């Protein structure tokens, strides 16, 4: 057998063409979809991620509004910036780059974002609505993964999905999205007992624990679907993908799998927010 690659770059490129066309239609009506990015401090990785998002905006014809704050910014100061953006009718989406410096109450700041502008899917209200099957912008990485699975016509009904990771912007929303798609879901993490046994039971595994090569290939059963949502400087993810083509039925490469879908979903949701605001 040879595992089929779930190509995030391909899907993102195809979607970008459609987004560019829809952005042009809005621009012709005098509406310029705009994403505001808030970067607190000067973490090199965060700076790179924000720049990638800004470059993607430029590529599809969107505006990006960059707000760079010092690493000694307080929670109250950040809340004021977010409130100003909430009140700015020219801003359709707000992205607060994670993580923020430790003195800031990140959850409080996430939850201050207007749900109508929460295109990164980070608010508690958005998570709750999404979990209940109501309209909301999903967290971008899990939402991008769901779009990828749909693109490749992978039916999740009845599959046992094991999500390894429990972060509020990846593991937890991923589990809810899979559950809403009729999968049976087990949530695991780095402290789960007998983790290898749990993973071996999975028809679909999502690596979202943030530890390089944490999930071993000998934990995976034959024909499993492997979604690796991790990315680390050594050009690897959370799953040991060596020889994966002889084990999995489908898998995401690292890089080029989940990563492009995350940014693409952010841009797509910003477009949708601008379209809703124009009605």
Image (cartoon, rainbow, N blue to C red):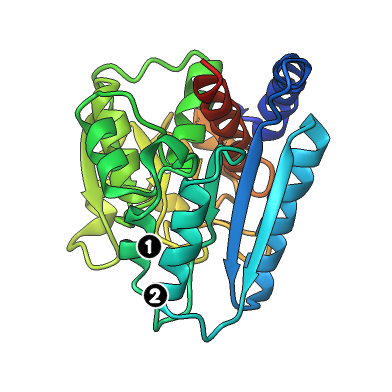
Check the picture and name the quadrant holding the N terminus: top right
Q: Position of residue 109 (x, y in %)?
A: 37, 62
Q: SS of the residue at dot 2?
A: helix
Q: Position of residue 18 (x, y in %)?
A: 71, 16
- Whether residue 6 sits left or right of residue 20 in the image: it is left
**Residue 173 in sight from this viewpoint:** yes
Q: Residue beneath label 1, please?
A: 109
Q: Residue beneath label 2, please?
A: 75
Q: How far apart are the two marked residues, 2 and 1, measured between alpha carbons?
A: 7 Å
Which residue appears at 66% of the width and 30% of the height? 7
**Residue 233 in sight from this viewpoint:** no
Q: Position of residue 264 (x, y in %)?
A: 63, 35
Which residue appears at 70% of the width and 18% of the height? 26
Q: Position of residue 78 (x, y in %)?
A: 46, 69
Total numbered labels: 2
Which residue appears at 41% of the width and 35% of the height? 116
Q: Are the residues at dot 2 and dot 1 in contact (C-beta closer than 8 Å)?
A: yes
Q: Is residue 195 above or below residue 150?
A: below
């Amino acid at each position: 057998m040879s595992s089929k690659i779930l190509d995030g770059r391909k899907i993102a490129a195809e979607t970008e063409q459609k987004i560019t066309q829809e952005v042009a239609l809005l621009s012709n009506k005098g509406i310029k979809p705009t994403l505001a990015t808030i970067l607190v401090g000067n973490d090199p990785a965060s700076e790179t991620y924000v720049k990638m998002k800004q470059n993607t905006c430029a590529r599809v014809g969107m505006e990006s509004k960059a707000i760079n704050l010092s690493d000694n910014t307080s929670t109250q100061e950040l809340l004021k910036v977010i409130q100003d953006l909430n009140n700015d009718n020219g801003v359709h989406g707000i992205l607060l780059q994670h993580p923020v410096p430790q003195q800031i109450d990140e959850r409080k700041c996430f939850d201050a974002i207007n749900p109508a502008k929460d295109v990164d899917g980070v608010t508690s209200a958005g998570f709750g609505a999404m979990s209940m099957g109501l309209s909301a912008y999903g967290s971008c990485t899990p939402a991008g993964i769901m779009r990828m699975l749909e693109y490749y016509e992978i039916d999740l009904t009845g599959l046992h999905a094991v999500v390894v990771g429990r972060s509020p912007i990846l593991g937890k929303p991923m589990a809810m999205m899979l559950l809403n798609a009729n999968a049976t879901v087990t949530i695991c993490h780095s402290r789960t007992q007998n983790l290898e046994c749990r993973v071996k039971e999975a028809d679909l595994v999502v690596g979202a624990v943030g530890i390089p090569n944490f999930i071993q290939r000998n934990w995976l059963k034959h024909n499993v679907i492997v979604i690796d949502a991790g990315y680390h400087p050594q050009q690897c993810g959370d799953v040991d993908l060596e020889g994966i083509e002889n084990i999995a039925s489908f898998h995401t490469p690292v890089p080029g799998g989940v990563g492009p879908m995350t940014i693409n979903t952010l841009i797509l949701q910003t477009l949708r927010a601008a379209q809703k605001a124009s009605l």
